[in-house]
Amino acid sequence: MFSDGVLPGGDLHTLRQRPGKHFTEQAVKFYVAEVLLALEYLHMLGIVYCDLKPENVLVREDGHIMLSDFDPFLPCAVSPTRV
């Protein structure tokens, strides 16, 4: 999912900066998997997302992520193949 707005869950940068709070290994694996799925989906649409950073990974209230800030992206003419 993709957004240009603010979500109640915040972003990964803000969440990781909380004093005394750390992501569990399970949470890290979950967020990495979610980001990879989002990037894979964008690549299937022919979009190369160029601004991946914790500030642009928004966390929804249900814990799933959304990518934001699509200003710097590149259209990709290559048609991906499934392996």
Image: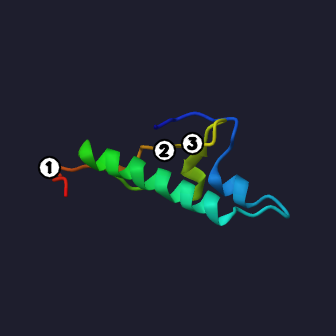
Label 1: how many Cα within 10 Å (few below 14, some 14–19, many 20+): few
N-term mark: 3 or 2? 3
Label 3: how many Cα within 10 Å (few below 14, some 14–19, many 20+): some
N-term mark: 3 or 1? 3
From the viewer's perspective, tell me whether residue 13 is left or right of residue 75.
right
From the viewer's perspective, tell me whether residue 69 is left or right of residue 49.
right
Inter-mark Cα distance, 1 to 2? 24 Å
Q: Which mark is residue 64?
A: 3
Q: Position of residue 47 (x, y in %)?
A: 29, 47
Residue type beneath disc 2: Asp
Residue type beneath disc 3: His
- Which quarter of the rendered picture does the C terminus lie within? bottom left
Residue type beneath disc 1: Ser
Q: Position of residue 53 (x, y in %)?
A: 53, 58
Residue at 26% x, 42% y: name it. 45
Q: Which residue is denoted by mark 2 in the rendering? A: 69
Q: Number of numbered discs present?
A: 3
Q: Secondary structure at mark 3?
A: loop
Q: Which residue is denoted by mark 1 in the rendering? A: 79
Q: Is residue 66 visible?
A: yes
Tag 1 and tag 2, C-beta contact below 8 Å: no
Q: Secondary structure at mark 1?
A: loop
Residue at 71% x, 53% y: name it. 14
* Label 3 vs label 1, nearer the camera: 3
Residue at 64% x, 48% y: name it. 11
> Can you say whether 47 is above or below 29 in the image?
above
* Label 1 vs label 2, nearer the camera: 1
Inter-mark Cα distance, 3 to 2? 17 Å
Q: Position of residue 71 (x, y in %)?
A: 41, 44
